[in-house]
Amino acid sequence: MSDGFGASARGQKRGAAPVGFLSELGPVEQGAVRALRAWSDGRAGLENLGRDITRTAGVAHADMVLHALSNLCDLCARHGRRPLMRHHSACACLGADESCFAHFVAAAADGQREDAMLLATLLVRPDFAPSLVGLAEYLGNALRLAASVPPHTHHTDNVVKLH
């Protein structure tokens, strides 16, 4: 059974298979998964993410994260090997595709370009991997900076948290 993207229903379930918990990841990886989920939730998810980052790191920083995230996810959506599977925004589980995305962003941010390139080829066609690595490096560094800034004391329960 094909979905038009060359992925079978069985393959998509594999991408969503739980492989761990968000709490087991470092701050950059957690931020990457939460950002991916926010992007997948559309405008409302991105607005919540933007408000959360604005409270912790300021408007300019939130704009940087959202811009990098949008470019990265748009490339993944347009040139992906198959659609990325993800869990619900409030889910504590970590899916297989989410784990790959998180480790890809973290490797790029850490300057591990060869590892990041390898992981990028799991997400998109190989000819788009170099473009993806640069965007992931930018996003990962922006998430790292947002995670290092102490949050303000005002939080809203319905806002996606980066920490």
Image (cartoon, rainbow, N blue to C red):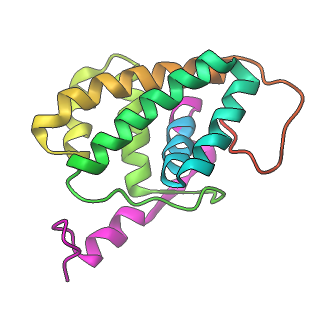
Does the magenta run of residues contain 25? yes
User: Which part of the image, by quadrant, shows the N terminus?
Assistant: bottom left
Describe residue 60's horizontal placement relative to residue 4 as left or right.
Answer: right
The residue lying furthest to the right in this view is 153
Q: Nearer the viewer, residue 145 or 22?
A: 145
x%, y% of residue 156? 83, 43
Instruction: Give coordinates of residue 45: x percent, y percent.
Output: 60, 49
Instruction: Report the span colored magenta.
Output: 1-29
In this rendering, the answer to whether 46 lies above or below 2 is above
- Residue that protrudes farthest toward the bottom in the picture: 1
Which residue is rendered at x = 30% and y = 59% of the image?
83
Q: Quadrant of residue 2?
A: bottom left
Q: Is residue 163 visible?
A: no
Residue 101 percent across, percent down from the top left: 38, 43
* Residue at figure coordinates x 46%, y 28% from the top left: 67
Nearest the viewer among 132 and 77 is 77
At x 56%, y 36%, the residue is 31
- For residue 147, which quarter of the picture? top right
Name the residue at the left extreme. Answer: 127
Tag count: 0
In this rendered view, identify the residue nearer to me: 138 or 45: 45
Determine if the magenta segment contains residue 19: yes
The residue sitting at 60% across, 25% down in the picture is: 62
Query: With 48 as the anchor, is 128 left or right in this view?
Result: left
Foreground pick, 24 / 88: 88
| Side (left or right) of 122 relative to 162 | left
Up/down of 155 relative to 109, above or below: below
**Residue 25 in picture, x, y percent from top left:** 55, 40
